[in-house]
Image: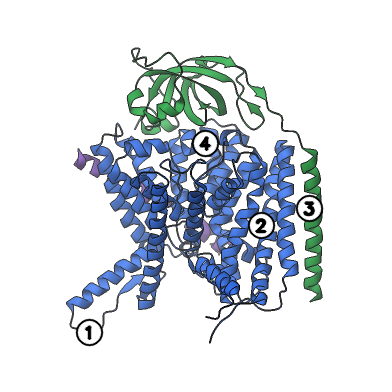
Chain colours: A blue, B green, C purple
Amino acid sequence: MKTRFGWHDLSIVLHYTGRILAGLSLLCLIPAFSSLVAGEFAVAVDFMISFGAMLTLGSGFAAFAPNGKRPGWVHGMTTAGLSWLFAMVVAALPYWLSSHYNSYLDAMFDVMSGLTTTGLVLLQDLDHVSIGINMWRHILTFVGGQGIIVLALALFTDSSGGGYGFYVGEGKDERLFPSVMHTAKSIWRISILYLVIGTMMFWFAGIQIGLTPIRAFLHGFWMYMATWSTGGFAPMSQNVLYYHSTLYQILTFIFFTLGSFNFALHAAVLRGNRRELLKNTETVSFTITMSLTLMVVIWSLTKLHVYPDLVAQIRKGFYHLASAHTTTGFMTIYPQQLANEWGDSAIAAVIIAMMIGGSACSTAGGFKGLRIGILVKAVLQETKRLMRPSSSIVVQKYSYHGVRALSEQQVRNAALVVLLYIAIFAVAVVGGCLAGFPLLESAFEAASVTGNVGLSIGVTSTTIPAGLKILYIFNMWAGRLEFMAVLASMGFIGIFFTRRKI
Amino acid sequence: MALWLAGFLPSFGGEPITGEIKSAAAIPVSRLVEKAASFDGSVVTIEGEIVGDVMKRGLYEWICVLDNGTAIGVWSDSASIYHGMIIGSYSSSGDTVRVTGVFHRACNDHGADLDIHLRTIERLAPGTETVHPVQKGRAIAAIMFCVSGGLFTFFWKRKETGS
Amino acid sequence: MKKMSSSETKAARIVHGVVVEILYTVALGLLGTCICMIVAVLAK
């Protein structure tokens, strides 16, 4: 049966995109309120402009696009893809109004970086930024980590049949419960639980290290949101280095590692199934890949005598490797130090760690540990098949919330997504080289962008060509949504405008 | 163990009396970071604006100096820092200071952080309040957008309940 | 002994789960520290 998309399909997509944008506009009220409390009245006005503009656009789409037909799978996926792009455009308005950006493209770059929990920054003069703007930056990364669609599903309980399509379009396919609405609410409950615990711990740590109670609370709240979402934003330009604190580093390590875990794993452990932490394919694969890449990093740093002692190697080498592997992007060294001091083998190991990333259905990016686990199991299965008589049937099992048999379809899906990640990574490497950067630095930044990491070796800056910024925005978007929504959006638009049938 | 605790205990012991003085003129912080290895252990001078927070840790404190877009942490005993420091933020530009101290590429006392251990600090210019007035045009735009958002939402909800 | 209500049991399970997860990440941190120690010695 051939498919064609017409105005009615477009109106469904625009309607739901409008609902999501209208919901997103409500988030503007949080920084508007915090600016009012802080006496930043001009900033509060900017956020009210943004709130009104987003609400107008969102409710305009929702009002003028009819909602007669139930959304299908493709509508859900296309809405997921397009709503992220619309969100990028409109959520950049407060940034633009703050005068901390050289162009609207830079502002959109930072929005996409926040929503995709990448963490690369083009904002100018971060150390003089208002409380309102810092609140907006960190809220975007916290909401983006969970997913703007997930937030919409959790809050707007219109039980449309296309709910699963919206959910999967945002790079999640794990159902914690049969109902996707219930799953979305559970994800938010887990995040809010840890938000309370984490903010309290960071607040306490902030007071210990010499911040005033109010500043300690603000920094704690923001740093927790950036940590759990594996976003990597920080309220000061020096990032985590600003705090000069072992305690802050330990807390960020704990919460960005937790943030990189699958929400289904959190749900299982919080329900009492603690063994899943040890048996789960993702945690096992994460432990193995982190250990292997860490060995390379420490070997390289030791050989080059980069750091004076073991404690320094742990606080710099291990911390940055963990920050890379969980796709957080926190740094306690300057990007120039990474480029000048770490050596090629350590940087290569960090690139591999960034590309592998965290767990599926988490706030982390990268290929995901589950896909690596599946592909490794597939290799084992093939090896066994070769060793045994041709007539024998080889069943490969893996542990993922129970023991499961590996299927050809799973292997194919995992391989396809990994291949697509590598493809857009390669394009970004070439883009960086064309912009005049050395190969290893281009590869590092490309991995950081594609895996939604946010570590920088010095490539990302406001002076890079606009084409490279757009390429990086595309990679952040595609990497975060894991391609399905991106392919659906591009296919939908292509079919709609060419009026073809497929 | 002592080094591990460096994150939340004050640093004990002073700096060595001798240290190569690289230059009496101020060095841009970005250059210090770029050429960190060559400046490591030397006495350097930087100029910049105080931003962020003064983080007191026992008898010592951290201040943050911002020089043309690159910030650096400066560690000092509290007695060496002058009183009445104006710190740069959204609502103020901080004191412009001249800091002389020992530069560390990977400080032994502070978990290999890149920092300066202060010897002297001099205020070159006091900080000032930064005013951000509410612009009339933006205030009107805010009201107009909020009204239009409200109207569109009303129209949308009425259409939904109607259908 | 007073029997816990289902909400108390649920709260206890959540608290226990949070503690276990945090301890797991601490264990990962210790594993990483051990790897750093061993590799640093071997590399010298």
Chain holding disc 2: A
Residue occupying image coordinates x 30% and y 75%: A396
Residue A134 x/y as whole percent: 61, 42
Q: Amino acid at mark 1?
A: Ser
Cβ atoms at labels 4 and 1 below 8 Å apart: no
- Residue closest to the eye, A81 or A232: A81
Q: Amino acid at mark 2?
A: Leu
Asked whether, in this view, residue B23 is left or right of residue A236, the answer is left
Residue B136 to residue B108: above or below: below
Chain holding disc 4: A
- Residue closest to the eye, A444 or A469: A469
- Using the rendered view, name the quadrant where residue A438 is placed: top left
| 10 Å crowding of disc 1: few (<14), some (14-19), many (20+) | few
Residue underneath mark 1: A392
Q: CA distance from mark 4 to mark 1?
A: 60 Å
Helix, strand or loop status at disc 1: loop
Residue underneath mark 4: A237
Q: CA distance from mark 2 to mark 3?
A: 14 Å
Q: Earlier in the sequence, mark 4 or mark 1?
A: 4
Cβ atoms at labels 2 and 4 below 8 Å apart: no
Chain holding disc 1: A
Disc ID at residue B146: 3
Q: Earlier in the sequence, mark 2 or mark 1?
A: 2
Q: Are marks 2 and 4 on the same chain?
A: yes
Q: Are marks 4 and 1 on the same chain?
A: yes
Residue underneath mark 2: A24
Q: Amino acid at mark 4?
A: Ser
Residue C16 to residue A31: above or below: below
Q: Is residue C25 visible?
A: no
Q: Are marks 2 and 1 on the same chain?
A: yes
Q: Are marks 4 and 3 on the same chain?
A: no
Q: Are marks 3 and 1 on the same chain?
A: no
